[in-house]
């Protein structure tokens, strides 16, 4: 039986299957980007595909602390569109 890779959401701190989470990466240039493939190089953090987790991560600055880089509005919009959420109410 193949082992399922598990990762922790930075907002709710729950362990979930890697494929169920979104990966956000800090690139070598220091920019935060959404990594849909899960293979982009750089420091990564995982977030549930859930509006509540997204709001909590933004409010508590969990992604910024995990990746040691500021989060921009473009990333917030990209995450919101990935989970099908209205980005205007998330900020």
Image (cartoon, rainbow, N blue to C red):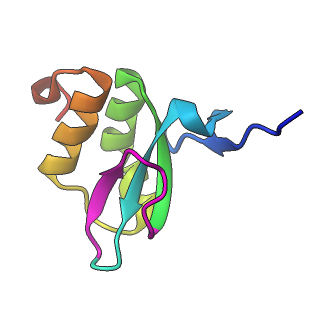
- The structure residue drawn at horizontal position 83% and vertical position 37%, both measured from the top left corner, is 2
Indicate the quadrant where residue 71 lies. Answer: bottom left
In screen coordinates, is 12 left or right of 75? right
Indicate the quadrant where residue 77 lies. Answer: top left
Locate residue 91, reporting x and y percent.
17, 35
Q: Is residue 85 magenta?
A: no
Q: How many circles with numbers are drawn on the protein?
A: 0
In screen coordinates, is 55 left or right of 4? left
- The structure residue drawn at horizontal position 39% and vertical position 60%, both measured from the top left corner, is 25
Q: Nearer the viewer, residue 71 or 56?
A: 71
Seen as rendered, the residue at the extreme bottom is 29
Indicate the quadrant where residue 90 lies. Answer: top left
Which segment is the magenta one?
30-42
- The structure residue drawn at horizontal position 14% and vertical position 49%, both measured from the top left corner, is 74
Locate residue 64, reporting x and y percent.
36, 58
Locate residue 88, reporting x and y percent.
10, 28
């Amino acid at each position: 039986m193949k082992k399922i890779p598990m990762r922790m959401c930075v907002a709710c701190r729950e362990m979930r299957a890697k494929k169920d989470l979104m990966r956000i990466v800090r690139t070598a240039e220091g920019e935060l980007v959404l990594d849909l493939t899960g293979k982009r190089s750089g420091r990564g953090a995982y977030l549930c595909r859930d509006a509540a987790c997204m709001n909590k991560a933004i409010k508590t600055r969990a992604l910024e602390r995990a990746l040691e880089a500021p989060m921009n509005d473009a990333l917030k919009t990209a995450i919101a569109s990935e989970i099908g959420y209205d980005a205007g109410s998330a900020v």
